[in-house]
Image (cartoon, rainbow, N blue to C red):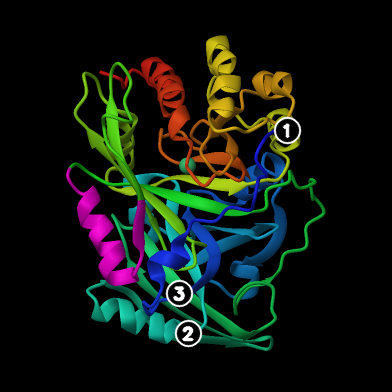
């Protein structure tokens, strides 16, 4: 009989037992992208991914320098920001990196304290604690730099009931495509340069109080041509998980090197979003034009029952449907997970999305790495960036 699949437990309570969490995080507050054309990007995230119109600021609301659209789907909140003139420094970010993630904002009880705790441990400040107010209340925000030019913003919103942040108005749109079942951010992955992974692992340990609870080396993550290393960092309550990748020597150029070349530095590689019905979500996303990496070969699916049986799990989903949609399956002692990866969502081969459904498993699909990287290498081959 198959084991009962329990909710995912990372066992972090044990690791943190007795230790004081100096940076309690309540969750991901928002993810902000700097983009060349926020209006069109917002249309894409609504149409393709089913995000809902949430809030807006721009010339009409008195914002003279930047325009931002806020989109939401269940607990996932995206902010798309574009500068309105060539003088705005956000342009430099876009010129260098292309469209990409600038801010991973973390929801905290006390933003000033979060900023003080982290900067006193060596974080470089991005924004000193700032109280922002409007008729809906007040929000306190403060920010620090992490890898590359990426920023963690701490957001304290105890006394706020507006659409998003002071300065934003409710975005009422006549165009509201249905959601696709995306629920929350499961993890966000950063790519860092050669020999930098351990530096950033230590930074997350020392500055943010995170722990490294899973590691993969180039022996585990490699194909015939390329390799990479990855360490997964988590905060004390396990709500925030940041795997960090660095390239490793291989015969050809790895996808991490390709990312670093095109992003021109370290940055966010992918955002994994959770659903509780991946078959429905992925069928919907595909019908809306979201492009996924090519489907694993038939042989991959032939091996799945064995991989599940090894850990005494029974697949609850229809294997035919998973195969048809190109959804991958991985198992560990606790359960299994279903996942699929999009192609990059901008022209540079940089940021992409993962859709994940956890059926008890707490891993990141290590059993799928090979099939996944081979699919990425097929894309790299087409882009001429493999060698
Ligand atoms: Fe992932």
**Image position of 112 (left or right of 140):** left
Mark 1 packing: few (<14 Cα in 10 Å), some, or many (20+)? Answer: few
- Work out whether mark 2 precedes mark 3 in sequence or the reverse, and give the earlier one: 2
Q: Residue 211: within the magenta?
A: yes
Residue at the image position 72 percent from the left and 18 percent from the top: 320
Q: Secondary structure at mark 2?
A: loop
The x, y position of residue 384, in whole percent, is: 33, 17
Q: Are marks 3 and 1 in contact (CB under 8 Å)?
A: no
Residue 322 visible in the displayed image: yes
Q: Which residue is mark 2?
A: 110
Q: Where residue 242 appears, x then y in whole percent?
A: 41, 54
Residue under label 1: 316
Most frequent secondary structure within the magenta stretch: helix
Q: Quadrant of residue 2?
A: top right
Q: Is mark 2 within 8 Å of ligand 1?
A: no
Q: Which sits in the foreground, 297 or 255?
A: 297
Marked residue nearer the N-terminal end (2 or 1): 2
For the residues labelled 2 and 1, the Cα–Cα distance comes to: 42 Å
Q: Is residue 311 above or below residue 90?
A: above
Q: Quadrant of residue 168?
A: bottom right
- Residues drawn in magenta: 195-213
Q: Is residue 190 above or below residue 222?
A: below
Dividing the picture into quadrants, the one containing residue 57 is: bottom right
| Residue 42 x %, y % | 63, 50
Mark 3 secondary-structure assignment: strand
Q: How many marks?
A: 3
Residue that badge 3 annotates:
154
Depth check: give the residue in front, 59 or 337: 337
């Amino acid at each position: 009989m198959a084991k009962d699949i329990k909710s995912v437990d990372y066992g972090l309570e044990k690791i943190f037992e007795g230790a004081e969490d100096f940076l309690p995080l309540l969750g991901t507050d928002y993810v902000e992208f700097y983009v060349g054309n926020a209006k069109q990007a917002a249309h894409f995230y609504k149409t393709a991914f089913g995000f809902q119109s949430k809030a807006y600021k721009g010339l009409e609301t008195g914002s003279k320098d930047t325009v931002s659209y806020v989109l939401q789907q269940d607990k996932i909140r995206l902010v798309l920001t574009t500068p309105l003139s060539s003088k705005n420094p956000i342009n430099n970010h876009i010129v260098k990196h292309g469209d990409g993630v600038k801010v991973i904002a973390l929801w905290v009880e006390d933003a000033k304290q979060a900023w003080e705790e982290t900067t006193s441990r060596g974080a470089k400040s991005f924004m000193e604690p700032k109280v922002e107010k409007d008729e809906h209340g007040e929000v306190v925000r403060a920010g620090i730099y992490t890898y590359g030019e990426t920023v963690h913003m701490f957001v304290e919103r105890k006394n706020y009931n507006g659409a998003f942040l002071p300065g934003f108005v409710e975005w009422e749109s006549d165009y509201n495509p249905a959601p696709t079942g995306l629920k929350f951010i499961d993890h966000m992955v950063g790519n860092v340069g050669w020999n930098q992974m351990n530096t950033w692992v230590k930074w997350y340990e020392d500055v943010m109080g995170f722990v490294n609870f899973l590691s993969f080396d180039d022996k585990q993550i490699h194909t015939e041509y390329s390799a990479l290393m990855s360490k997964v960092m988590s905060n004390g309550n396990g709500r925030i998980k940041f795997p960090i990748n660095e390239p490793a020597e291989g015969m050809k150029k790895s996808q991490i090197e390709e990312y670093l070349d095109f992003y021109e530095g370290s940055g966010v590689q992918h955002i994994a979003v959770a659903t509780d019905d991946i078959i429905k979500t992925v069928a919907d996303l595909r019908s809306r034009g979201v492009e996924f990496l090519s489907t694993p070969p038939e042989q991959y699916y032939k091996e799945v029952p064995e991989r599940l049986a090894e850990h005494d799990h029974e697949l609850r989903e229809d294997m035919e449907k998973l195969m048809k949609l190109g959804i991958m399956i991985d198992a560990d002692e606790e359960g299994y997970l279903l996942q699929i990866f999009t192609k990059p969502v901008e022209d540079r081969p940089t940021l992409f999305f993962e859709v994940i459904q956890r059926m008890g498993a707490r891993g990141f699909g290590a059993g799928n790495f090979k099939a996944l990287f081979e699919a990425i290498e097929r894309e790299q081959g087409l882009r001429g960036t493999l060698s």
